[in-house]
Image: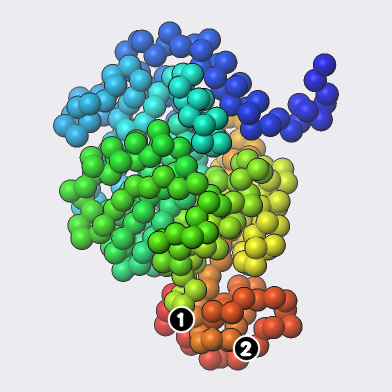
Amino acid sequence: METDNAKATPTSSSLRWRILRRALLRRSSCSEAIHSNQISRRTKIGFNLVPFRLVDKDGEKNPDFSSMERHRDVCFCYMLPLPSAPKLFLRQRLEDCADLNDFEVCNRYKIDNTGLVCQWPSEDVLAYYSLSRRDSFRDKRVIELGAGYGLAGLVIAMVTDVSELLISDGNPQVVNYIQHNIDANAASFGNTKVKSMMLHWGQHEVSEINGTFDVIVASDCTFFKEFHKGLARTIKCLLKVDEPSEALLFSPKRGDSLDKFLAEVKDSGLHFSITENYDTTIWKRHQEFLSGDESWPNYEPDHCYPLLASSAYAFLGTGTTFRYNEHYFVGPRKIRNKSDLTYDRDIFIKYFKSHF
C-alpha cells in the first residue's frame, strides 16, 4: 500500500509513468482533427502575456511546417506586442500524444519528459520579461537552459539584438522541435546567430562553451530535485568569469523545491537573490488571479507564479569583490565567505550602471 509520504513526494519516474498512462488511455484523441480544446490546458491557461493563435484555425499557412505530423503536432502563431514585430511560429505537441518511445528516450538519457508535455506558464513569463527588457540583451551571448519548445529563446533572438543565442534542452526529441522552430523563424533573426543544442546539466565540466555566456535564462527548471545539483553546476560553468555576466531563472516555489535548488546553488559558490514583484504587468496578472479571475481556475501561487531568481557578476579586477543590494559581484577568484568581501559602494555603483 502506498504511504501518505509517498503520495506527497512522487518520484520523477512515477510522474513519467502517470503521464504515459494518461496518454495511452486517451491515445485515440490524437487521430482526430486539430481543435483548440485538444491543446494542453497549461498552454491555454496561463499568464497569456504574448498573444497567440492556432495557425490552422485562422487558415494561415507557414510553409516551413509542411513536414508537421498532422495528428500529433500543432503550430501556433505568436504576435509579439511590439510595433512592427515579426510573427513567431512555434511547433509543439498536442496534449496526450505521448507514446512509449518518448519514455524510452527519458530512461535512456535519464531525463524528464516535461519539455514535450506543453508550453509551461513560466516560459511565457520569461518571454515577456525578456521582451520588455530587450536592451539589456543587446550584443550579448545568451543561452536558454531547459528551453522546451523554445518560445522565450526565439523571442530573445527576434527582438533583442543579441549577438548569439543557444537554445538548449536535455531531451533529443525536444531539441528536434527547437531546431524546427529555429528554421521556421530564421528570417526574423537579423544578424543574430541562433543554434539548438542538446545539453545535459552537470555533464559539461570540460566543454568548449564553458565560461562563454554573458546571460543565462531558464524557466521552470527546478521541478525535479534530482537535477538541482547538475543545474547549479551547469550555470556556474557556463557564466563568464572575466566579464560581466548574469543568470535569470523563473520558477514557482512548488513547496520546498525552489529553496532546495537555491541551497545547491549556494553550495556551488554562486549567490542568487529572489524577487517576487519584478514586472508591473506580470504582477498585475498575478493579483487578478489571486482575486478570482476565472480565466485561470484553481490558481495557486505556490505552483503557478514564478519568482525571479537572479545572479549578476561584474568583473572588477582579480581579487576584487563588491556587494550591492544583496547581489555579489566578483572577479576571477571565488567568494569563500563574507569576510572575503571588500567594496567601495560609490565606485561600484558607477561601474555597475555603466555595464548593466
Picture coordinates of residue 201, whole percent (x, y):
53, 49
Query: Residue at image x 60%, y 91%?
Result: 344
In-image side of 90 versus 334 (left or right): left
In-image side of 153 versus 301 (left or right): left
Query: Residue at image x 26%, y 29%?
Result: 55
Picture coordinates of residue 297, whole percent (x, y):
58, 29
In this rendering, is residue 297 above or below 47?
Answer: above
Q: Which mark is residue 353?
A: 1
Picture coordinates of residue 11, whole percent (x, y):
68, 31
In this rendering, is residue 67 above or below 229?
Answer: above
264 or 92: nearer the viewer: 264
Quadrant in the picture for residue 207: bottom left
- Label 2, on which residue? 343
Quadrant of the drawing holding the N terminus: top right
Query: Residue at image x 55%, y 16%?
Result: 22
In-image side of 257 versus 297 (left or right): right
102 or 51: nearer the viewer: 102
Helix, strand or loop under label 2: loop
Query: Residue at image x 72%, y 79%?
Result: 338
Tag nearer the camera, 2 or 1? 2
Helix, strand or loop under label 1: helix
